[in-house]
Image (cartoon, rainbow, N blue to C red):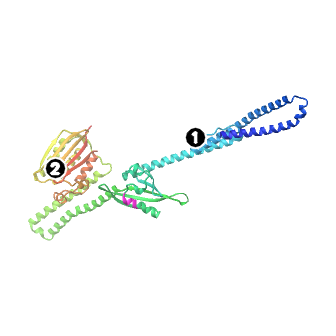
């Protein structure tokens, strides 16, 4: 801008110089007439001084013109350059000169509009970024060459990736399941939206995802790439399977006693009732199956109650030592029947809990230990404090549990040894009830087991305050 200012000044001075030179020529034509009556040297000196004064005066006038006319243009130009660099806070000085005030005002209006548009755009981008980063579904955008342009935190967490694994990479270069890679290729080839449910192994577990892919189109239907959105439905699949298993197990568990009762009743009606000994035997079986059916319905109702949302226990300071001793007395007959010793290693511990529910928990754990322990073994119950928790350990010397079965141990109707559990009168719901009751106490239950050695159930409950 300074060169423009200098050029303008030089142009003005050149034009003034030309005019003065022309005037000097005209005067020079009249000089012979004037010189006849005056000293020539003085005349030339006088003319030269007049020329210098005129040039100096012209320079001052020209500089003033430049200050008035060129400076606002220079300021507007500098402001426009700042706007071009992205500095939308820049403003031009609005001079009082009528010829440039409109230009300065216009450039300032443009700057304010650009600043507002940029602020709105930045706010929208921040909202979009926050939405993408915090959405529950995993998202990845891939350009038309296969390069990754955007991923969110859920995608990296779901597929165990880091920023270094993704930055500047193509989708074929990152560690994603093969089935997902094939799905991406399908969307690329068809250039149409697609949806599918995919299953793949992640470590030792199986994961299920619901995945949706669609092309990304720009202006004039220009194909820019694709976007893939996936949602983890592993838990939904697991719950769906549990529901199916529950229906199948309930049907099976109910059918067995009902079939027995129906069969023996029909036999009695067909004439077996005439033999008193046979009648008594059949009635005992019918009573046993009826009790089993009653226990199953009772456990189902109990489980349904504790699984309801908002279920709460009547918590109060509870002496676990006394409570465990009471539970031991209630299962004493079952211990004697199998000649199993109950060993108690108890310390005084007061927890915040519901005494009746905790007795139910201990009864279920002790009966479970008795059921799966051979005769002449020992069941050990330990009670102690650690930190702000009371800890109960129920250790048996039973058949043990395979590592692959431990995760399913608290499922409804799941049995490690179905024949032994059913013959003992168990419903397969006890441990599921235990888990829900302990969680209602804001505690947790853990299992450690070794096949052929035994199993230890550990319960953690918060101490009373």
What segment is highlighted magenta in the picture? 177-182
Q: Which label is found at residue 89?
A: 1
User: Relative to the observer, which residue lies in front, 343 or 31?
Assistant: 31
- Badge count: 2
Which secondary structure dominates the residues rendered in magenta? Answer: helix
Q: Quadrant of the C terminus?
A: top left
Residue 272 lies, in percent from the top left, at: 12, 69
Disc 1 from disc 2: Cα separation: 76 Å
Q: Quadrant of residue 201?
A: bottom left
Q: Which of the marked residues, 1 or 2, is nearer the chain's N terminus?
A: 1
**In the displayed structure, would residue 286 be above or below residue 306?**
below
Q: State the residue at coordinates (90%, 34%).
A: 33
Say left or right for 74 vs 206: right
**In the displayed structure, would residue 108 be above or below residue 198?**
above
Residue 120 lies, in percent from the top left, at: 54, 46
Residue 168 seen in render: yes
Q: Residues within 10 Å of mark 1 (few under 14, many from 20)?
A: few
**Which secondary structure, mark 1?**
loop
**In the displayed structure, would residue 22 be above or below residue 199?**
above
Q: Residues within 10 Å of mark 2 (few under 14, many from 20)?
A: many
Q: Quadrant of the N terminus?
A: top right
Does residue 180 belong to the magenta stretch? yes
Residue 74 lies, in percent from the top left, at: 66, 40
Q: Quadrant of residue 414?
A: bottom left
**Which secondary structure, mark 2?**
loop
Q: Which label is found at residue 396?
A: 2
């Amino acid at each position: 801008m300074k060169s423009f200012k200098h050029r303008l000044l030089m142009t003005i001075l050149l034009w003034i110089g030309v005019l003065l030179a022309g005037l000097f020529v005209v005067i020079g034509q009249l000089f012979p007439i004037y010189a006849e009556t005056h000293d020539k040297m003085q005349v030339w000196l006088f003319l030269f001084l007049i020329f210098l004064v005129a040039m100096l005066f012209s320079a001052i006038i020209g500089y003033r013109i430049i200050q008035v006319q060129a400076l606002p243009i220079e300021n507007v130009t500098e402001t426009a350059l700042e706007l071009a660099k992205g500095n939308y806070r820049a403003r031009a000085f609005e001079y009082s000169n009528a010829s440039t005030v409109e230009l300065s005002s216009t450039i300032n209006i443009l700057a304010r509009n650009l600043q507002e548009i940029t602020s709105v755009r930045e706010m929208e981008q921040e909202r979009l970024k926050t939405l993408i980063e915090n959405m529950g579904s995993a998202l990845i955008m891939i350009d038309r060459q296969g390069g990754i342009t955007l991923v969110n935190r859920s995608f990296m967490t779901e597929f165990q990736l880091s920023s270094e694994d993704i930055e500047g990479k193509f989708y074929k270069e990152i560690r994603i399941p093969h089935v997902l890679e094939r799905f991406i290729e399908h969307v690329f080839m068809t250039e149409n939206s697609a949806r599918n449910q995919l299953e793949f192994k992640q470590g030792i577990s199986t994961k299920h995802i619901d995945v949706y892919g669609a092309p990304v189109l720009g202006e004039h239907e220009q194909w820019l790439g694709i976007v893939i959105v996936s949602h983890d439905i592993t838990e939904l699949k697991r719950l769906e399977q549990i529901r199916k298993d529950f229906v199948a197990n309930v049907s099976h568990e109910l059918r067995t006693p009902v079939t027995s009762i129906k069969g023996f009743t029909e036999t009695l009606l067909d004439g077996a009732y005439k033999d008193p000994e046979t009648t008594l035997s059949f009635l005992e079986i019918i009573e046993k199956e009826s009790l089993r059916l009653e226990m199953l319905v009772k456990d189902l109702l109990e489980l349904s109650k504790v699984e309801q949302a908002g279920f709460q226990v009547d918590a109060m300071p509870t002496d676990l030592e006394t409570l465990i001793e009471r539970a031991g007395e209630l299962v004493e007959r079952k211990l004697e029947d199998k000649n199993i010793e109950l060993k108690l290693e108890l310390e005084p511990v007061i927890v915040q809990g519901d005494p009746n529910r905790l007795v139910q928990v201990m009864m279920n754990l002790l009966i479970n230990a008795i059921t799966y322990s051979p005769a002449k073994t020992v069941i050990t119950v330990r009670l102690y404090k650690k930190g702000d928790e009371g800890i109960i350990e129920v250790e048996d010397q039973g058949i043990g549990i395979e590592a692959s079965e431990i995760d399913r141990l608290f499922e409804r109707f799941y049995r490690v040894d179905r024949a032994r559990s059913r013959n003992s009168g168990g419903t397969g719901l006890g441990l599921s009830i235990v888990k829900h009751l302990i969680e209602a106490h804001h505690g947790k239950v853990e299992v450690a087991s070794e096949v052929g050695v035994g199993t230890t159930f550990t319960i953690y409950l918060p101490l009373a305050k």
